[in-house]
Image (cartoon, helix red, strand yellow):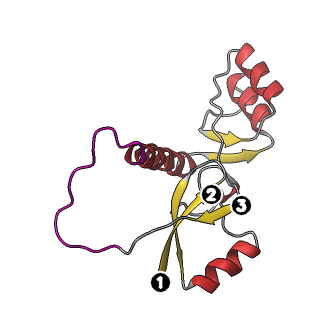
Amino acid sequence: MKVLDLQCRQGHVFEGWFACEEDFRSQQQRGLVQCPLCADEHIEKRLSAPRLNLGARAAPAANDSAAADAGAQAAWLALARKLMANTEDVGPRFAQEARRMHHGEVPERAIRGQATPHDALQLIEEGIAVLPMPLPVAAKETLQ
């Protein structure tokens, strides 16, 4: 198993696990390697060192921006996992379903889906709470 440090054009850093280097290249050429945060398919390998477990790790410096970024990404992924597990995907019918629930036509439930910025603004103006949260296509699969 080969663990690679990867980065998309947006600067999101993440790990990818592959059987070998050729497996990584093959998946990348077929467009199967995506950033788990923004779904960018332009992925590059970062320099990485082998991991050695030699004992306890030193605490990261308080101003370590890489650690802060990793923490933010982990929090976003945890939220995305919870959202995916606890909502029904209504796809492009999001605005219609939100209105039907708001008017009592169907029972209220947690939903997610797609809406245009115009539709989202109209829902908000009608007093219907919406929370835009970009989820990459990869998020519809198991998030790692």
Q: Residue 107's spot in the image, x, y percent?
A: 64, 34
Give the alpha-carbon distance from disc 2 to disc 1, as whole Å: 20 Å
- The residue depicted at 75 percent of the width and 26 percent of the height is 120
Farthest residue in the left direction?
55
Going by the image, does 64 lie left or right of 46?
left
Residue at label 3? 41
Q: Does the magenta-highlighted stretch encompass residue 60?
A: yes
Residue at label 2? 35
Q: Residue 88's spot in the image, x, y percent?
A: 64, 47
Asked if labels 2 and 3 touch by Cβ distance under 8 angstroms, the answer is: yes
Identify whether 88 is placed above or below 36: above
Q: Which mark is residue 1?
A: 1
Task: Answer with mark 3 or mark 2, whichever residue precedes in sequence.
Answer: 2
Going by the image, does 108 lie left or right of 49?
right
| Range of residues picked out in magenta | 51-66
Identify whether 59 is placed above or below 132: below
As helix, strand or loop, the secondary structure at mark 2 comes to: loop
Three-letter code, disc 1: Met
Going by the image, does 50 lie left or right of 135?
left
Q: Nearer the viewer, residue 108 or 111?
A: 111
Q: Residue 15's spot in the image, x, y percent?
A: 50, 65
Give the alpha-carbon distance from disc 3 to disc 2, as whole Å: 7 Å
Task: Answer with mark 1 or mark 3, whichever residue precedes in sequence.
Answer: 1
Asked if labels 3 and 1 touch by Cβ distance under 8 angstroms, the answer is: no
